[in-house]
Image (spheres, rainbow, N blue to C red):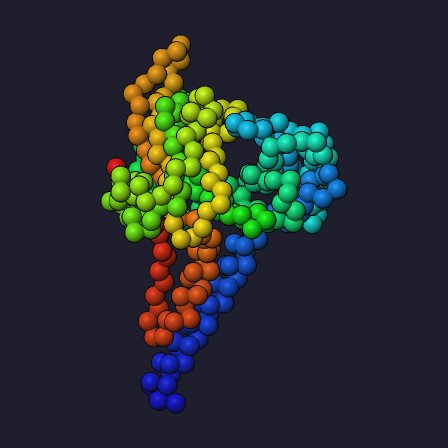
Amino acid sequence: MDAKGHARAARRALITTILGFLAATVARESAAGTIKVTTTGGVIHFKDAPANSAYKIYNHSPNDNKGTVISGGTGTTDASGESGSPIISGMNGTFEVEVGGEHYLGIDKAENGTNYKSLEQINKSVSNFSHGLSPVFAASFSSVFTVNGVTTDQFNLFNASAAFPYDFTMLVVYKGLDKTYFTAAAFDSTAAIASGTFYRDLVATTGGLGIPVAGGQDIPMISIPVSGVSGSGYDLVIGTAQPYLGNGMFGSPFAFSLASSPFPEPDTWSLMLIGSWGLGATLRCRRKTAPVSTR
């Protein structure tokens, strides 16, 4: 074999090694931070969680950030990572599972046999997300899920401040905006908003809305589901928030905007694996990210 042949063989071996590593990583990543939940027979049950780990199952009513641990909703997973089966018949709202140090939110009674990714894993994943936020909400993110053929684009506002809770003075949602405007410069422009459809004014419909302080008893997050969306457009939340200083006093308000393009997000490693097939002699791996505004 000549020098060129040896070089080609070496490149093939290198690519094979990389693909093997990425495939193994995809398998690990797909298993980590994901549980399968069933809700048949008036009970809730999950599996594929970490083995022999303590868990809690909460029930969340609307606008309830903390939630309540349901009767029989505490325990330890068995050696295969399965939970017990506490009764949930007659309960409304959504459910949350806390296990292995991670949180699985937005579990609906109608979603039988659904795989859920943890809040922590979603926050790590690549998302089609654009924002113009104060640093206090910089950890906010979006997630997309489909139930009974209806796709929901869910905005999750996260308060990173351990000093103050925040009160929203405006929180308006639009859906189906023209993706032509899905850029850092234009995603929340007047023209972009005009291209979409008004969905909801959360402050007007709830009579007031806030987000708890980080590090307290309540989860410092509120979720805003936008149902019936499609991949042809994007969705937008615009608002203003002000810190609550105590004794009826508020600090200066700030404005923010969050935009999400609602189509399922490929796992970062999966993107890398797919891209590796076209490497040839040059190894290149790109990860697509959405525009970020720092306004």
- Location of the C terminus by quadrant is top left
Q: Residue at x 64, y 34 (%)?
A: 57
Point out the residue furthest to the bottom here: 1
Choose between 162 and 270: the one closer to the eye: 270
Q: Position of residue 16 (x, y in %)?
A: 46, 72
Q: Residue at x 72, y 34 (%)?
A: 89
Residue 184 lies left or right of residue 274; in this view the side is left
The number of discs equals: 0
Q: Position of residue 254 (x, y in %)?
A: 30, 27
Q: Position of residue 153 (x, y in %)?
A: 46, 44
Residue 231, placed above or below residue 152 = below
Q: Quadrant of residue 136?
A: top left
Point out the residue furthest to the top here: 247
Tell me if I can see residue 112 in this picture.
yes
- Location of the N terminus by quadrant is bottom left
Choose between 179 and 215: the one closer to the eye: 179
Tell me if I can see residue 83 in this picture.
no
Residue 247 lies left or right of residue 35; in this view the side is left
Residue 14, placed above or below residue 153 = below
Residue 110 lies left or right of residue 120; in this view the side is right
Q: Residue at x 65, y 37 (%)?
A: 54
Choose between 134 and 18: the one closer to the eye: 134
